[in-house]
Image (cartoon, rainbow, N blue to C red):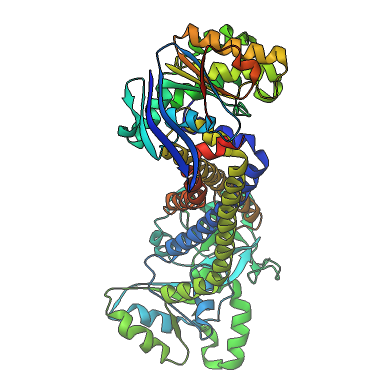
Amino acid sequence: MISVRGLAHRYGDAEALRLPQWTVAQGERWAVLGASGSGKTTLLHVIAGLVRPTEGEVEVSGEKLRKLDDARLDRWRGATVGIVLQALHLVRHLSVRDNLRLAQYLAHLPQDDLRIQDTLAALGVAGKAARRPPELSQGERQRVAIARAVVNRPKLLLADEPTANLDDAAAALAVDLLTEQAARHGATLVVATHDVRVKAKFRERLELA
Amino acid sequence: MNLASLSASYLRARPLHTALSLILLSLGVATIVLLLLVVGQLEERMQRDARGIDLVVGAKGSPMQLILSGIYHLDAPTGNVPLAAAQSLGKERFVKKAMPLALGDSWKGYRIVGAGHDYPNHYGATLAAGRLWEKPMEVVLGAEVAQRTGAGVDAKFAGAHGISGEGDEHREAPYTVVGILKETGSVLDRLVLTGIESVWHVHEPHQGSRVAGDQKDKAAEPDREVTVVLLQYASPLAAATLPRQINSRSELQAASPAVETARLFRIVGVGAEALRAFAIVLMVAAGLSVFIALYTALEERRYDLAVMRTLGASPRRLFGLLLLEGLVLALLGALIGLALGHLFAALLGVWLQGHQQHAVTGLAWRPEEPWLAAAALGVGAVAALLPAWRAYRTDVSGTLAQG
């Protein structure tokens, strides 16, 4: 699923990430661990095709990312990768349903309200489809963000610090939901975290220094 | 969900900024539309009234006054000229048509014009009722005169001396309405037409006594006078010789409608130019407002833009999104502005109608209007360009790494 060789990324002179070798099989669940500044987020962005690394080869879901031009990389990301961001970043003025439609539209996929409703139902927020994010609780917003990441049935589900600022119960629930949704769609799950509560839940772990 | 509905949702999310941009843009467009309509319709109307009239001959005075009184019946006449001189003009080599008019009286503010039947024929007028005048003191009413006064065929009235409608009435010589013209869209609609003899007849007592005092021999047959003669050239050559020839005669003055109306529009044009400049300032302010609205919104939208990139949007789509927001604003502003401009013109028309000069309508279109809409779209596009470029350059990874 993911194959990384000789990866290095620098912002100017500062090295942000170095990862000689990393292989992830389809359907595996990984935790990417490390202190802040160790390059967890950068690694996530690299395998999502949001950042072109300074060095190294990255192959995700059979595509050598270096070989895709910018436009095709964007299309590939929309169709293949679902991303849950730490701050969620739902579009505030759009309804929950429209946030999911936006994901379908931007990925060049048909806008399918049945699929949206089904996805929301699987996350227990079917009743909130017409609400806008500011009207939801933090937990509901997290579920909607996960729904938006999985509505296009991605092969790869990425989550960046999904449990930051959550209490123990909420953090456990967030990880469970991600795991459950990844399994439901047969997606590979990669979670970047420095949260020890999360670490315990993953067998596969990548430690970045 | 598509780019347009997404753009619209962002505009709705910031109603105050959107409203400000729309107000400025639509006021700018409306002002220009109003100008186009008023100036255009005025010009059209003046051209229609002056069509086929190449030269106006009357007494010495201001040439513009001669045109305004002789063709448009707006100003006071410059004076009278002897009938003999007028008649000699009709025999000139290059003159195809000569229409003498006798002016001076009015009825309820509408001018009474003594003329031949060739005068209504010149404007292609047809009768709505009755017949044309045959005998002295028979009159035919223009469509607007008939409608406003409610006078019909067989109605009798006394004309007032002077053109303001406040002079002494000629009670001893009442007019009889024998016909009513159909609407022509020309100056005829606002005139009361009669034979030249009628005007002479009404003024006979004054003229008779004056003439009698001046020239005793001719007292029996007073000097006949007319006010203006409208000439149509038989050949363009006439323009080169005839005006100079007429102006060299001490008692006559010739004025060209084309030259004088052009001069009039240059004078009026100063005001129009000032308004136009003001409208352009409004449009530029609207452009700035669109720019500021989009540009300041970028800061709070940078996460949205970055998230859209993670969802598969290309930088070009983000560029398109912002550009479209500028264009949607501009399009709405242009449409509201066009509608407002026509509404203002219609209101102005109603207001002017109270002053008996229905020269403006909001129901006509100017050929420049599509260009105006295009210019407004241009303003929106230019204003959105820099914000769109910033959106295009969104640093996804850097933005998301911040939080």
Q: Residue at x 63, y 11 (%)?
A: A125
Residue B210 place in picture, x, y as percent: 61, 87
Residue B179 place in picture, x, y as percent: 50, 52
Quadrant where the image shows the C terminus of chain B: top right
Residue A103 appears anywhere in the view: yes
Q: Residue at x 64, y 19 (%)?
A: A196
Q: Residue at x 43, y 66 (%)?
A: B50
Residue B352: quadrant of the picture: bottom right
Residue B130 appears anywhere in the view: no
Q: Nearer the viewer, residue B382 or A59?
A: A59
Q: Nearer the viewer, residue B322 or B204?
A: B322
Q: Nearer the viewer, residue B158 or B244?
A: B244
Q: Nearer the viewer, residue B87 or B64?
A: B64
Residue B246 place in picture, x, y as percent: 39, 87
Residue B251 place in picture, x, y as percent: 48, 89
> What is the count of numbered marks?
0
Q: Residue at x 42, y 80 (%)?
A: B86
| In the image: residue A31, left or right of residue A60 | right
Q: Is residue A136 above or below residue B244?
A: above
| In the image: residue B13, left or right of residue A101 | right
Residue B175: quadrant of the picture: bottom right
Residue A155: quadrant of the picture: top left
Q: Is residue B184 above or below residue A55?
A: below
